[in-house]
Image (cartoon, rainbow, N blue to C red):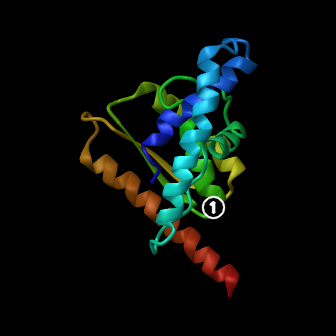
Amino acid sequence: MPDFLTFFLAWFVNADVRVKENTMRRGIAWLVYTLLEGRVQGVLDQADAIMQGFKYHRPSHTIREMAEAAAQVVSMTHAYGESWLIAGEIGTMAENGVPNVICLQPFGCIANQVVARGVAKRMKAQYRDLNVLFLDLDAGISEVNYFNRMHFFVSQARGAAGQSALAMS
């Protein structure tokens, strides 16, 4: 499960993208982002080192690693909703052996829904074993719809796990 701080860390990458795309100049704001990024990443690295002692810890990814994964399937100029973060987070999960991902999208965020639908096909082409379900949690959708979609997701995950087990034997 991605951490909440990632959403704010995207500002560092977005500042560089804006400078590269000539929509922002290298001014004081860009300098502050650049200086602050190293400091924030240092704190996150310390927290990650402490968490390594926990049994189920998975090393976290830097915002730059997530940006690299996202850049393979979506333009980095997307700057609405969670922008390129959905693709980046799912991409880093897939690269690290987490092929089954449910992306819950509450509050009817249209931008996230559009990005999710738009990148789904590209992500599945990029990561062949990826089983992803984008589930919109809107009040108007029936409970049966949620359960049916999750049932198909789990069935596909089990089928893929069974095929992997057969391939290993």
Q: At 51% from the left edge and 68% from the top edge, which residue is drawn? A: 52
Residue 72 screen position, x and y as percent:
72, 40
In what element is the residue under mark 1?
loop
Residue 101 seen in the current view: yes
For the image shown, how many numbered marks are present on the structure? 1
Residue 129 screen position, x and y as percent:
64, 60
Looking at the rendered image, the quarter that the C terminus falls into is: bottom right
Q: At 70% from the left edge and 42% from the top edge, which residue is drawn? A: 68
Out of 59 and 137, give the one closest to the viewer: 59
Q: Is residue 104 above or below residue 150?
A: above
For disc 1, the marked residue is: 96
Q: At 48% from the left edge and 64% from the top edge, which residue is drawn? A: 50
Q: Is residue 21 above or below residue 125?
A: above
Residue 77 seen in the current view: no
Give the quarter of the image for residue 24: top right
Give the quarter of the image for residue 140: top left
Q: At 39% from the left edge and 28% from the top edge, which residue is drawn? A: 109
Q: Is residue 161 above or below residue 60?
A: below
Residue 85 screen position, x and y as percent:
55, 38
For the residue marked with disc 1, what is the amino acid? Asn
Badge 1, how many Cα within 10 Å: few under 14, some, many 20+?
few
Looking at the rendered image, the quarter that the N terminus falls into is: bottom left
Out of 112 and 76, give the one closest to the viewer: 76
The reply, left or right, for residue 135 in relation to residue 44 is: left
Residue 70 screen position, x and y as percent:
65, 40
Residue closest to the far bottom? 169
Out of 34 and 161, give the one closest to the viewer: 34
